[in-house]
Image: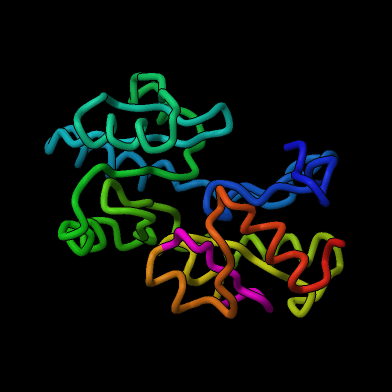
Amino acid sequence: TDGFPGFEGGFDSYITMTGSLCYDADGVYADTPISPEVSARFIDLVDREGFDILILNRDGSFASGHGPRMLELEDMVAFHYPEADIHELAKRPIYQFCAFVPPERDEELRQAMPDCFVTRWCDVFCDIVPSNSSKPAGIRAALEHYGLRQEETIAFGDGGNDVTMLQYAHIGVAMGNGNPEAKRAADYVTDDVDKGGIPKALRRFGLIG
């Protein structure tokens, strides 16, 4: 949250949970959790089939277990997700599930969860968010909250779950290490995230010196 060279000081506002929870120093201005009935249906599916999930709520991200796919993600992001009882977590608002299943199961999950949007950042897991939410919806909420126009937006992404956001923003920037789907959706492809890709693009468009 401290920013980066040329953009010090962090950020004024946060669009999180794939657009479902947006907030700033004054509080939450967009709040779109998954309905309790839909959450219960998904957790019943997890109980029957036994695949690992992450549950994302206001307190953080919690794992149902640590099978091979969960461990692969933790290795990718260099972070350990604490385990928690998913039935206890379901007693509070849930904003996003991550299902650790292969891509060929995405359509099956869409059929089982028609009131949710199933998308994917990588082959390890897919995101499940409420159908009335999305990254573009989070951007629209921020624009309305701050009185800004779509023409004033720039978005950065690297995966399939960023495609609609990159298409919605006035300038969509894909990271150099992003997947082909994100790059096709973008207006501009910058360098890898670990090679200064974000400040490079911000300079390219005259947003920082």
Residue 65: name its quadrant: top left
Horizontally, residue 26 falls left or right of residue 43, namely right
Residue at image location 44% in from the left, 61% down from the top: 178
> At which x and y percent is residue 140?
68, 67
> Compared with residue 133, is residue 27 higher up or lower down, i.e. above or below?
above
> At which x and y percent is residue 192?
53, 57
Horizontally, residue 132 falls left or right of residue 75, namely right
> At which x and y percent is residue 133?
53, 60
70 or 90, nearer to the observer: 70
Horizontally, residue 144 falls left or right of residue 67, namely right
> At which x and y percent is residue 96?
44, 45
In magenta stretch: residue 129:
no
Q: How many numbered discs, if any?
A: 0
Q: Where are the magenta residues, as a range?
A: 167-178
> Compared with residue 186, is residue 68 higher up or lower down, i.e. above or below?
above
Residue at image location 36% in from the left, 60% down from the top: 119
Applied colour scheme: rainbow
99 or 114, nearer to the observer: 99
> Compared with residue 168, is residue 72 higher up or lower down, i.e. above or below?
above
Q: Report the quarter where the C terminus lies.
A: bottom right
Residue at image location 19% in from the left, 31% down from the top: 68
Residue 147: name its quadrant: bottom right
Residue at image location 12% in from the left, 36% down from the top: 48
